Image (spheres, rainbow, N blue to C red):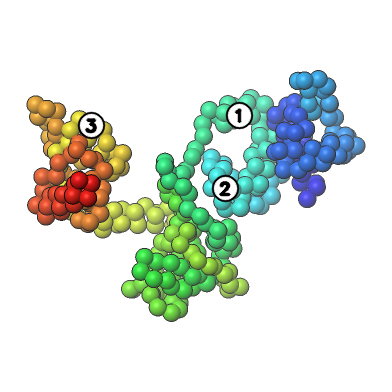
Amino acid sequence: MRADRLLSLLLLLQNRGRTTAPELAAELEVSVRTVYRDIEALGASGVPVVADRGPAGGYRLADGYRTRLTGLTDAQAGSLFLAGVPGPAQDLGLGADLAAAQLKLQAALPAQLAGRARHVQERFHLDATAWFRDADPVPHLARIAQAVWDQRVLHAHYRRRHGEVRRELHPLGLVLKGGIWYLVAGVGVGVGVGVEPGAGADAVRTYRVARFLAVDTADDGFERPAGFELAAYWQESTVRLDAALRRQTARLRLSPRGRQLLPMQFGAAGTRALADAGPPDADGWVRISLAVESETIAVGDLLRLGTEAEVLGPPELRRALAATVTALADRYA
C-alpha cells in the first residue's frame, strides 16, 4: 500500500510541479505528517525532491527528472473508460484507481502531449447527473459492478412498482442514463411472487439500481449470451420503450414562450414536434402534433407548459386537462 502511495506522490510531483504538503495530503487522502515521511523516503531512494521555502514554496522534482515507473494495474486500466466522469467512477468504487491511472498516463506522455491533456482537462468537464434532481441512492452499486466484472450470478431482492420480487440475475452490464444507474441482466430463476410475464432463462431485462433492496453474489458464474452487445441492447431497448410509452398524439397550440419551453419539458419528442410545426398565426402561436404518454401522465406533463399551450385534441385529452384545471381552480378559489 505504501509503495503505491509513494508512486502516486512521485507522479503528482512530476505532473503538477511545485506542490505544497497540504495539497499533496489532500490528494493522497493522508495526513501532512505522512507526506513528510513519504518525501523523506523518496529522497532516500534516490529521487531528487527539492523543497522550496517561502510563501510560494512547496515540493518539486529537480529540473529534468522524470520517472518511467508508469505501469498500469488491471484495476487502473479497467477504470480508464470512465476518465471523463469521475463521479460515476467513484460510485463504482473505481475513484482511486482512476486517479492513479490518470497520473500514470500523464507521466508517460511526452511533455507536449501532457500539456495538451492538462489543457483539455482544465477546460472541459462532464457532469452525468440531470439538473434539479438528486442522484439515486445506490448502496449496492459497487457490489453489482463487481458481479458484472467477475461474471457472477446475483441473488437480488428488487422493488418494483407493484410489489417486490426475488430473482436470480446474470449481470451483463451497467448503464448510466441521466444520472440514474441501470443494470442490464439476464433473468435466471424467479423466487416468490411477481415474476415478470415471459421471463425465462434467456430473457434480458433492465433494472434500476436504486430499487435493489439487497444483493448477494453467488459463487457460480454464468455464460454471457452469444453476440450480446451492451450498447446495441441499450439503444434498441430505449427505442422500444419510447415507442411503447408514447402511443398517443396530442394536437397543441403553442405561444412563442411555449415553443421555448417544449424541448425543455419534452426533450427530443418536443424538438421533433417543433420541426414539423405549421406557420405561426398573427399572434405568433403555432400548431404542432406531439407524441405523449398515457392520458394521466400526459395531463401532468402538459400542465407544466401552463398558459403557454392549449390542447386542441384528442377530445378526451382536452376534457381531462380541462377537468384538472377546473379542480385546481376550485381548490385554490
At 70% from the left and 31% from the top, the residue drawn is: 15
Most foreground residue, 309 or 104 = 309
Depth check, mark 1 against mark 2: the one in front is: 2
Q: Separation of disc 1 and disc 2 at Cα?
A: 19 Å
**Residue placed furthest toward the front:** 333
Q: Which mark is residue 257?
A: 3
Most foreground residue, 14 or 250 = 250
- Compared with 195, 27 (above or below) is above
Q: Separation of disc 2 and disc 3 at Cα?
A: 39 Å
Q: Is mark 3 on a helix, strand or loop?
A: helix
Label located before the other in sequence (2 or 3): 2
Q: Is mark 2 on a helix, strand or loop?
A: helix
Q: Where is residue 213 in the image (x, y as percent from the top left)?
A: 50, 66
Instruction: Verify CB contact (< 8 Å) between mark 3 and mark 1.
Output: no
Q: Position of residue 197 (x, y in %)?
A: 33, 73
- For mark 2, what is the residue? 89
- For mark 1, what is the residue? 118
